[in-house]
Amino acid sequence: MYRKIFVFLLVSQKFLIHLKGNPVTSNVREQLQELINRMWRLDTDRPTDYRLDWGRQCDGYRNIAANKSTNSESTVSDSFRLFTYVNEGIFRKGQYSTLISLYSSSLFRPFNNRIDMNAFEQNEYLMRDVFDAFTNTTVFMEALRYLQEKVTSLLKVNFQAGTTATSGYLISGLLHTIEGELICNCVDSNPTIVHSAFLVYLGFQHVYLGEWKGMTVGGLHSWVRYYHLEQSGAINYYCYINHAEDISGTVSFSWEGRKKKVGGFNIATSPAFDFAVFTICALLHPGQKSCSYKLNGYSIAITTYRMQCSTGTCLASAYPTYIPETMLLKQIMDNTSVPLNNQYFFH
């Protein structure tokens, strides 16, 4: 399963960049929302027994929802814990236990995104375990079916339009992967693919584990990672920018003295749910494009950034942002779209 999924994602992302875009029409939004609703129902591994203390709203962000400008800096003089309780029995579930095993491994270090290749080769099985755990969930398989349908549809549209930018072997490989027939050992044997896997893992580290960039924190868009760091005393939580009840939020904190002024993550979802949504958004609606939906009634926008790698494009970062209803109302009145390039959305 790991190899099939990995090759499918590599091939499809390389193929999609040559195709006509997937504009976010009302029909596309409805289809994406229907997918999210199905995934929410299928996400049986999401946490349900936990409590949060959001504390106060960060100075300088209290008027952002009303779209009022401010130059104030967030005040970070006081710190406390965001998570006041989590039933840790959830961490015995496969997708959690495999992810948590990465925290104590030598595969990733927050201060260095140039992973030692010897450590990478010796510990890559840990990443395979994580991907297997994520991709074997019903929630990810639901997202994969949606992606397969979309890619197949785009193939037909671009074939009929005479698109020839992508070579035949990619089309053949993609179709075989969609049908679940492609069994490939190239992840083990092809140096280019191995290097690409390495870069994919760097993007994974950024999102799911976090990294240090001087005296700032990069990434760390996983509530599981955040919780474990907070429990160990490594994280000081300061304030929230906005949050959708206890479902998703954007906060300000520090990790061993390094600041994260604006950092967002979901809380009421499993890691596999986030992984699936980030995959869909990165492939179909990346970067500045709108990838928004309602999660249990709350409006969420996903931002994804991509970087160049030897096979084409790899995911660099992905994160959710809660969009307050006041901002949505203003968009409707102004007839504008969600400003994903706005500082409010930039992590």
Image (spheres, grey):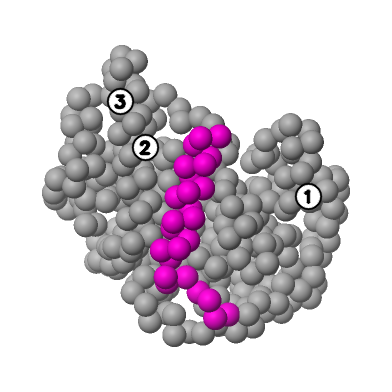
Residue 43 in the magenta stretch? The answer is yes
Residue 153 image point, x, y percent: 34, 31
- Residue at label 2? 150
Mark 1 or mark 3, which is nearer the start of the sequence?
A: 3
Residue 281 seen from this side:
no
- Residue at label 1? 326
Mark 3 or mark 2, which is nearer the start of the sequence?
A: 2
The reply to whether the C-beta atoms of the residues labelled 1 and 2 are less than 8 Å apart is no
Q: CA distance from mark 2 to mark 3?
A: 10 Å
Location of residue 113 by image quarter: bottom left
User: Given the image, on which type of amino acid does mark 1 rest?
Assistant: Thr
Q: Decide whether the magenta segment is chiefly helix, strand or loop.
A: helix
Residue at image location 62% in from the left, 74% down from the top: 235
Residue neighbourhood size for the residue with mark 3, other residues' Cα within 10 Å, grouped as few (<14), some (14–19), many (≥20): few
- Residue at label 3? 156
Residue at image location 42% in from the left, 79% down from the top: 91
Q: What residue range appears in magenta?
A: 26-50
Residue at image location 33% in from the left, 74% down from the top: 94
Residue 155 image point, x, y percent: 31, 28
Location of residue 76 by image quarter: bottom right
Name the element at disc 3: helix
Name the element at disc 2: helix
